[in-house]
């Protein structure tokens, strides 16, 4: 719940001080917006939901947090030596906005799709799936279309790849970005925004 409410992409690195019970115990929560809550576009609706969740966490779990910046592992996104291999398109005409990047990745393959998307948007999508901050250092501000799919090569013993996104899957993402889109991902360290839990308690009764 904290990760959704505060947009924490990598809780193992970015969420500090959460007690053991809060990591292991599950809660069933039913909530509904107040009467008259307006219909909003998806992105704006998500922000409002996050604000309401923060209020609920503060009220029912007595959650108090603050942010700090720590040095930690990050990935830098840049243009590979061979140059960019994506199709640049016209910028969206208002009220249309930048298209979000869709990604589904795992050890057995994946797909990354962008429609009138930016390199900054790609970096945000990769942050979610790679569980590490991805910093856009391409310097590119254009809008692009891209759609790439990949599958893991068969192993010699024809064993299925391990579930989730482990080293094999991350390696496939990196090689696909370079070969198909002309982009690289480089491991390094840098400033990482962290949320530090000052206080949290089991929820109050209804």
Image (cartoon, rainbow, N blue to C red):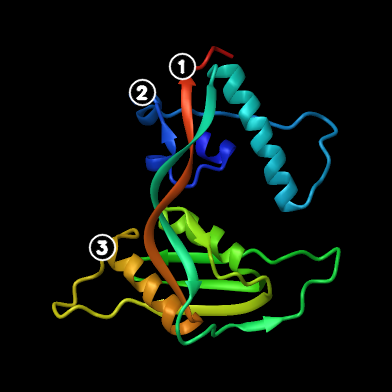
Element marked by disc 1: loop
Element marked by disc 3: loop
Q: Are marks 1 and 2 in contact (CB under 8 Å)?
A: yes
Looking at the image, residue 26 sits to the left or right of residue 38; the answer is: left
Label 3 and label 1: CA atoms lie apart by 36 Å
* Residue 44 on image: x %, y %: 74, 47
* Mark 2 lies on residue: 21
The image's mark for residue 7 is: none
At label 3, counting other C-alpha atoms closer than 10 Å, the crowd grade (few under 14, some 14-19, many 20 or more) is few
Q: Residue at x 49, y 71 (%)?
A: 78
* Residue 62 on image: x %, y %: 55, 16
* Mark 3 lies on residue: 162
* Residue 22 on image: x %, y %: 40, 26
Residue nearer the viewer, 165 or 76: 76
Residue nearer the viewer, 141 or 24: 141
Looking at the image, residue 96 sits to the left or right of residue 105; the answer is: right
* Mark 1 lies on residue: 202
Q: Is residue 107 visible?
A: no
Q: Residue at x 73, y 45 (%)?
A: 45
């Amino acid at each position: 719940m904290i990760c959704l409410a505060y947009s924490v992409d990598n809780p193992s690195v970015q969420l500090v001080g959460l007690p053991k019970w809060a990591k292991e115990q599950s809660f069933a929560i039913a909530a509904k917006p107040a009467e008259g809550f307006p219909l909003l576009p998806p992105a704006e609706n998500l922000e409002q939901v996050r604000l309401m969740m923060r209020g609920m966490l503060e009220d029912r779990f007595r959650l108090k947090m603050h942010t700090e910046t720590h040095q930690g592992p990050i990935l830098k996104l840049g243009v590979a030596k061979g140059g960019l291999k994506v199709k640049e398109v016209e910028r969206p005409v208002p009220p249309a906005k930048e298209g979000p990047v869709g990604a589904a990745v795992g050890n057995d393959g994946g797909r990354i799709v962008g429609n009138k998307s930016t390199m900054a948007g790609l970096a945000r999508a990769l942050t979610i799936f790679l569980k590490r901050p991805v910093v856009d250092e391409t310097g590119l501000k254009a809008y692009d279309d891209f759609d790439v799919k990949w599958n893991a090569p068969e192993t010699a013993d024809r064993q299925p790849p391990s579930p989730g996104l482990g080293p094999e899957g991350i390696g496939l993402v990196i090689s696909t970005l370079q070969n198909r889109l002309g982009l690289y991902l480089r491991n390094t360290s840098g400033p990482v925004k962290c949320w530090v839990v000052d206080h949290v308690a089991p929820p109050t009764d209804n």
